[in-house]
Image (cartoon, helix red, strand yellow):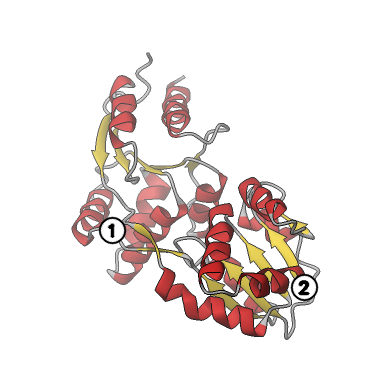
Amino acid sequence: MGNGLEGKRIAIGGSRKIEEISTLIEKQGGIPIVRSLQGMVFLAEKEVEPDLLKFVNDGADWVVFTTGIGLETLVNLAEKLAVKDAFLNNIRHAQIASRGYKTLAALKKWDLKPIAVDEDGTTKGLTRGLENVDFSGKRVMIQLHGETAPALTKFFEDRGAEVLKILPYQHIAPESETVTNLCDEMANNEIDAVCFTTAVQVRSLFNFAREKGKLTDILNCFHEKAIAVAVGKVTAEALKEEGVERLVTPENERMGAMIIELSHFYENQTD
């Protein structure tokens, strides 16, 4: 096993597989620092019910699905509310856009055919295919997962659409003390890299930094000291949207591959 992370302090922003990631970092000579940036993601049936019924009653010109589990959850909830047929009919009568291969599989299950899909699994890849569409005065329903996806919402609103966001899964913010500790460590240049495994973690850190007046410290650290590590394209896209340019992302979107890629990055710096 290499030692590309020798002496490096690596913050772990995730809340899953912490022990495995920590062990990998240690085997590469690094020092794992657990700073979970993701609180609980929960199924928000009661919270989402009014938005779901609004879509059932009003329909939409476009529907945008971003996760397969989100679509499945909405279908199940519509069934509980005895509006499943109306829900699916409204989707069939709309133009459908889809992001991600799991979302495509879920749409196929219900014989729903999108006319717009992403090129690369990212929101930006999806919106590139919609740039020439006129959304003026159109109603657009966007299914989201755990976070509000401001860039995606802004894309449609800037083009004159009326946007209805439906979040069947919603996010509880992480412990304030944990995020404060990470922000202070980054401000003091005590962190060499931060590993992000979801876009939610990215939003948690940057939203907190904005609210607490620490955004400049965080961006300076990412520009000059700490490497941002994203497990995959969607997480990397969220970091880029926040202005982070120095990024490490593995081709194989797995947590283990993420740590190995980071180790290789540092090894190449010393060659």
Q: Name which quarter of the figure residue 267 lies in.
A: top left
Residue 2 percent coordinates (x, y) = 38, 15
Pick whichever of labels 2 and 1 is earlier in the sequence: 2
The disc placed on residue 93 is 2
Q: List the residue tagged with mark 1.
A: 174
Q: Amino acid at mark 2?
A: His
Q: Nearer the viewer, residue 177 or 73?
A: 73
Residue 44 is labelled as: none
Q: Secondary structure at mark 1?
A: loop
Residue plotted at (49% across, 57% down): 243
Seen at 46% across and 63% down, the residue is 147
The answer to whether residue 33 is left or right of residue 235 is left
Q: Tell me the amino acid under the disc marked 1.
A: Pro
Measured along the vertical axis of the image, is residue 10 above or below residue 218? above
Q: CA distance from mark 2 to mark 1?
A: 39 Å
The x and y percentages for residue 4 are 38, 22
Please name which of the two marks, 2 or 1, marks the residue nearer to the observer: 2
Q: How many residues crowd around disc 2 within 10 Å: few (fewer than 14), some, or many (20 or more)?
A: few
Q: Is 8 placed left or right of 143 in the picture? A: left
Q: Residues within 10 Å of mark 1 (few under 14, many from 20)?
A: some
Q: Quadrant of the N terminus?
A: top left
Q: Secondary structure at mark 2?
A: loop
